Image: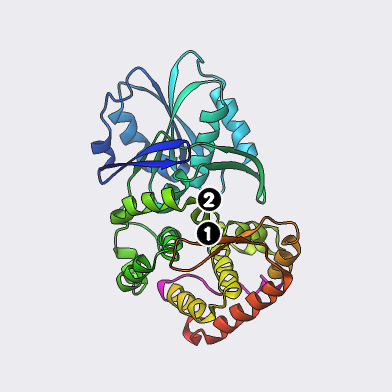
Amino acid sequence: MDTQFVVGSFESTIHYGQTFFQAFTPTQFKGKHLIFFANQQYYESFANQATTFFEHTDMDWYILSNQRNCHTVNEMLEGLKFLAKFNRSESYVFVSFGNKGAIQLTSFFHQFSPFSSEFLAICLSLQSFSVALTKERFLIQPPFLKSLIWENLPQASYVFLPKDAVSLGERLSDFLVLLRIALTDDTFYTQLQERYLNKERLVKESYMNYIEFITQSYATNTYPLTQYGSWFEEILYETENSHVLSAEMKHYLGFLFHFIWNCVTIEKSELCKDVLGWMRTLGFPINVPDSFVVSDFLVKAAQESKNTPRLVQVDFFTKNYQLIAPNEEQFIDVYQLYQHVIEEEPSSDRK
């Protein structure tokens, strides 16, 4: 199935509901040079099949790490060295194959390298699909400093969601894509709560039925969906002892603390407790390791808030939102509400 995605002056075609070998034809890219920018895990599991399938097409692979944030300036420089050996007179198809970092880097090479190229994205998770729908692109200088920002979209995205062998962590990351949308849509929120009662259901149920709805949501409500949680996630990278948190954990906590802050600013503490309780039931790690001090993180956030752009404050279960400048007092309330939720956590769930 196909659907069109339009945001601003950008347009992209979304293909979904088929296998890789149904969505493409062996001669589809004949006369062009395919270059896959793939995370290591996807290269190892799929390169041989793809090479056989496109046997009549010139093809190369550039292998990226499996890290969530592999779209670094250093990786970009290595990628440019790799591309330097190719003939500039050829027509290329640059294909991202993997996570958000793969999409960001492929986008960069399409936008700025001296080649005539198309930009396609193969998305194997809702998380990477949501990045394909986000026109803002950036590279990072570790730990998480945005060093270059531009805008584009893939000409087309192909969504293939594995039906099995998906870890709980991967499912949780994908579920956050749905939860962000649910916070702006009461009907969808109710549907998710009824369908995903526990982590067992979360792992077993397919997300493929949501592709068109996600596409429509990002087209009509793109700013809050793409920004929600991102500032808090960036602050986590700058906080002392944040190395004890994985990149995925920082992503979860970025959403979690933005949501708590949102609840504080519109006085929705009971909703906060309900949503965090549900997230805990689904397997989200609400607690942090003892070596990471939440109060230090929120002090850092309060300090940075003096110079930060305004944050998205969602009027829950509506499409309405505002951009609000956070203040220090709010972060005290965020800490207190978070601690209250943790104290209510069943002892069997505590780390």
The answer to whether residue 72 is above or below residue 264 is above
How far is disc 1 from disc 2 in space, using C-alphas? Answer: 8 Å
Callout 1, which amino acid?
A: Glu
Which segment did they paint magenta? 281-295
Q: Which residue is mark 2?
A: 68
Q: Residue furthest top?
A: 89
Asked whether the residues under the numbered discs 1 and 2 touch, taking CB atoms below 8 Å apart as contact, a structural biologist would say yes
Of the two numbered discs 1 and 2 on the same chain, state the one appearing first in sequence: 2
Residue depicted at x 45% and y 72%: 279
Question: For the point 71% across and 74% down, which residue is it?
Answer: 329
Which residue is more in the foreground, 244 or 3?
A: 3
Can residue 44 be seen here? The reply is no
Residue 177 placement (x, y as % from top left): 44, 58
| Residue 270 placement (x, y as % from top left) | 50, 82
Q: Secondary structure at mark 1?
A: helix
- Disc 1: which residue: 248
Residue 285 counted in the magenta span: yes
219 drawn magenta? no
